[in-house]
Structures are given as structure tokens and as C-alpha cells.
Amino acid sequence: MTLNHPGENKWRHQGWFAAHRWLLLRRTSQLLVLGIFLVGPLTGFWLVKGNLASSLTLGTLPLTDPYVLLQTLATGHVAEATAFAGAAIVLVFYLLVGGRLYCSWVCPVNMVTDTAEWLRRRLQIKANRIKLNRATRYWILVLTFVLPLLTGALVWELVNPVSLLFRGIIFGIGAVWVVVLAIFLFDLCLSQRGWCRHLCPVGAFYSLLGYISLVRIGAVRREHCDDCMDCFTVCPETQVIKPALKGEKQTSPVIFSGNCTHCARCIDVCDKNVFSFTTRFSKKPNTHEIHQMEVTS
Ligand code: SF4
Ligand code: SF4
């Protein structure tokens, strides 16, 4: 078991880059998203106007967060046609690549919660002082629609840490650091992966898209699993792995849970190259295919 240094074996056998490739790509993606929005305020050239909730790229491509659009509709406001068009584009994208890809590849809060988890491992903090049910985030999600219905205001967006941090980075952090610090300390000291795994309604919304999305992670070489547990250690939603990795031979090795964030850390850390990106239609590879993968890995 390599509880404190998941991926150490892969690093040793296949090199540092192989053990961090997807992590590097994700961080690049998260920083790139921020960078694209920062170009306007910094240079006066508005590549993209707006924010994660609603934006216009090069004056032509509208993108709207469907979750924010639904909350807006719940307030009773009529949205513009471009908002619906932008939401449709975003919906199609996440229905293809996986809903919670938003969490791992776009959301700026993910960098905060990943850092808290990393530090938690380094400090060997194991206790969860607050025990939360994973369904809590779905109840909060419902609440974020009920409140606009009752008040006519976008209540959740006033306190949504994702929007606050994003706007804080682009337009000045202000008092947002208090919210960020609170989430960091909550995850570090009180509840492992507490915010994203149990509370955040944004992640809960995108997980619903993830249940039917095309691209998935699969334990396609699960026969090679040596039970080192590295994938369980790094996975932000541990519960999604077991059915695919430890299912009976006839069960699919594809992870069908919408809560897999497609962070690909399981691919990074697995020395046996058990995991890879695949699609929901992927079948268990036959012996010949497994042999081919062995030869090329
Ligand atoms: S669960 Fe929420 S805060 Fe966490 S990464 Fe996803 S959207 Fe961001
Ligand atoms: S199964 Fe893999 S890709 Fe999915 S959330 Fe866990 S570590 Fe990330």
C-alpha cells in the first residue's frame, strides 16, 4: 500500500510525466480558462466577455451555464434567445465529454479542494469530524431552484463559491478569500473532500448530465489490478471506482456513475495502466486487445 504517495510506483517505473500527465493537462485547462477571461481586463482586447455563467467569445459565440439559466428561469425572468443557444452548446459539450468534467477541468474551486486534499494526505489527517451524506448536495441543488421560485432572486449565485472565486480572480479577489479559506479549512480539517463530494450543488447538477454522457473512464485492464489502492486514494469520488474495477467478470469495466469527474488521476497513478478514457459503449476488451494494450503500454 502506498497511502501517502499514490502513484509512486508508476513514477518509479514509467517516469514522473507519466504519473502526472492528466493532472498537468487539467491544471493547464483550468488556468487557460481563467487566462482567456483575464485577457480583456488586462489588455483591453476582449477575447471573451462575461464570466462562467454567461459569456460571449469574439462577439459571436454565446456560452451559458445551463444551471444558471435554469435558476434564472425559476426567478420568473424571461431569458434571451442567445442565452438558450449558449446553454444548448454547453449542454451538448458536457453530454459528450462528461458532466463533471466541469469540476476537474474548469472549476477554479477544484484547485483549492485538490490542494486541501493533498495537504490532508501529507499531514496524514484521517479523521472526518463532520460526517455528511453524499445526497446532501442534491438536496441543496433542489433548494437552489426553490429559493428563486419563492423570492424571484438568484439567491444561490450570490454565495456560489465557484462564481465568487472566478469573478474574484478576474476582477479582484476582495473578501472572496474568506470563502475560499473556509472551503479549504473545511476540507482539510473537518470533512475529506467535503465541499465537492457532499455539498456543492454545481457539481451535483453537472453529475446529472454525467450519468448519460458519452465519454467515460473505464477500468479496461482490471485483470491487472494488484490492489495497491492508489486509484482509491486519489479519486475525489471513491465510490465510483469499485463497480467497474471489482465487478464480476461479466460486468462492464466502464464507470457509469455521473459523479466520476473525469479527472483522470486514476489513469495517472496506476502503475498497471488499468484505467483509460473510453466511451459508454465500450465493451470489455477481449484477450487479443488486452495483449495489444500490454505490448503498447
Ligand atoms: S463540486 Fe462544485 S466546487 Fe467542486 S469542483 Fe465541482 S463545481 Fe467546483
Ligand atoms: S474514477 Fe478516476 S477519473 Fe473518475 S473521479 Fe475517480 S480518479 Fe477521477
Image (cartoon, grey):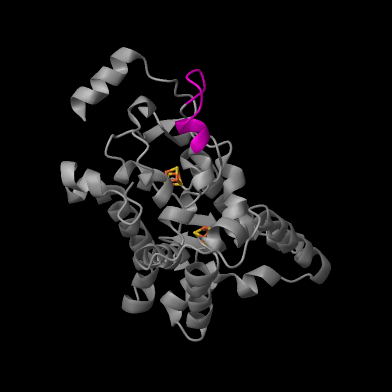
Residue 203 position within the rendered picture, expressed as x and y whole percent measured from the top left: 56, 55
Q: Is residue 286 above or below residue 262?
A: above
Image quarter (top left, top right, bottom left or bottom right) of the C terminus:
top left
Range drawn in magenta: 242-252
Tell me the quarter of the picture where residue 271 sits. top left
Expressed as whole percent of the image width and height from the top left, the position of residue 239 reads 53, 44
Q: Nearer the viewer, residue 205 or 189?
A: 189
Q: Residue at x 35, y 32 (%)?
A: 225
Q: Is residue 263 visible?
A: yes
Residue 245 among magenta residues? yes
In the rendered structure, the answer to whether residue 232 lies left or right of residue 204 reads: left
Is residue 122 shown left or right of residue 245?
Answer: left
Instruction: Count how many numbered circles sit on residues in the image.
Output: 0
Q: Is residue 129 above or below residue 8?
A: below
Q: Residue furthest right?
A: 150
Q: Position of residue 47 (x, y in %)?
A: 37, 65
Task: Give the residue at x 38% y 28%.
Answer: 222
| Residue located 19% across and 51% down the image | 16
Decide if residue 214 is on the left or right side of residue 74: left
| Coordinates of residue 29 in the picture (x, y in percent) | 35, 56
Check if residue 7 falls in the magenta segment: no
Residue appearing at x 36%, y 25% in the figure: 223
Above/below status of 197 relative to 216: below
Comparing 216 with 152, the one in front is 216
In front: 126, or 278? 126
Q: Is residue 78 visible?
A: no
Query: Is 169 on the left or on the right of 42, as rendered?
Result: right
Magenta span main SS: loop
